[in-house]
Image (tube, rainbow, N blue to C red):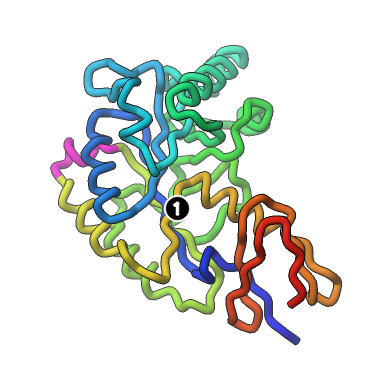
Amino acid sequence: MRTICFCYPEGKRKALTMSYDDGQIFDRELVSIFNEYKIKATFHLNSGNFGKKQFVSAPEIKELYKGHEVSVHTVTHPFLTQIPKEEVIKEIIDDRKNLETLVGYPVRGMSYPFGDYNDDLVKMLPSLGIEYSRTVVSTHGFGLPSDFLTWHPTCHHNENILGKLQSFKKTPPWEQLTLFYVWGHSFEFDRDKNWDMIREFCKRVAFDDSVWYATNIEIMDYIKALRNLKFSTDRNIVQNLSSIDVWISVDRQPVKIKAGEIVYL
């Protein structure tokens, strides 16, 4: 019996994604570090703060975050479970509109301000065009999310990410797909005087041919496409109904399934 497993692009088994909130001016330095090491990140922004003291300005958004993902963090950063539903809708929809006007693509992701959410809020998000939302609940592991609307990260960057990187690197290539998901706020590096730490992390994790470096939305889209692959009952035929190419392994050999393609294994 052949063994079929999901893979990341090019048959990789590991992925890294970074996630940073609020859009303060310290994002400029953080983006510079990420770009230097070819690491991709998602930046969750409060459009109501653009141009205020210590926050990035609207005119710089498109160029500053080029190559990364811009995502919703609401307009004014409220506790979303403590305001009327009508205000929740306005906070999220208006932030999407404002960001989309600046970046020129549909904004489909989010992170919860203060990590504050409940079941009612989660149920509302799809109707507001939000397909994933990150929490602040650290799993300290490298598993994939079961629900992208309550997407728990591996850890905050102050939770010994250099130590966790050692474990991430030691994961055998034949194990399940792994995802190292780090989150935080860029102002914390300035406050804590530990810019050297995130630079060292990026230096150690970068340019690894076994790792896929991706934004939050790229991870989500890819995993959903994998999970929606259609296999025949004997698993000799697979169909990719999505608009993106995906990879599987067949007896540990990588196989590319192009968008819209039917492949005979």
Q: What residue did someone put label 1 on?
A: 214
Could you say where residue 205 lies in the image, as x and y percent from the top left?
31, 63
Tell me the residue at 39%/16% (across/down): 48
Q: Give the number of callouts.
A: 1
State whether residue 154 is above or below residue 257.
Answer: above
State whether residue 145 is above or below residue 239.
Answer: above
Could you say where residue 6 lies in the image, as x and y percent from the top left?
62, 68
Tell me the residue at 24%/52% (across/down): 36
Query: With 246 as the anchor, is 205 left or right in this view?
Result: left
**Callout 1, which amino acid?**
Ala
Q: Main secondary structure of the magenta part?
A: helix
State whether residue 169 is above or below residue 197.
Answer: below
Secondary element at tag 1: loop
Could you say where residue 123 lies in the image, as x and y percent from the top left?
67, 32
Q: Is residue 210 visible?
A: yes
* Residue 249 inside the magenta-drawn segment: no
Tell me where residue 228 sits by quadrant.
Answer: bottom right
Query: With 70 as the anchor, is 265 left or right in this view?
Result: right
Query: Badge 1: few (under 14), some or many (20 or more) residues near its Cα, within 10 Å?
Result: many
Q: Is residue 141 visible?
A: no
Tell me the residue at 57%/42% (across/down): 150
Query: With 133 as the anchor, is 22 left or right in this view?
Result: left
Q: Residue furthest bottom?
A: 1
Q: Residue furthest right?
A: 233
Could you say where residue 155 lies in the image, as x and y percent from the top left?
39, 51
Q: Which quadrant holds the N terminus?
A: bottom right
Boundaries of the magenta span: 186-193
Q: Which quadrant holds the C terminus?
A: bottom right
Q: Nearer the viewer, residue 205 or 135?
A: 205
Tell me where residue 189 sits by quadrant.
Answer: top left
Q: Nearer the viewer, residue 74 or 107?
A: 107
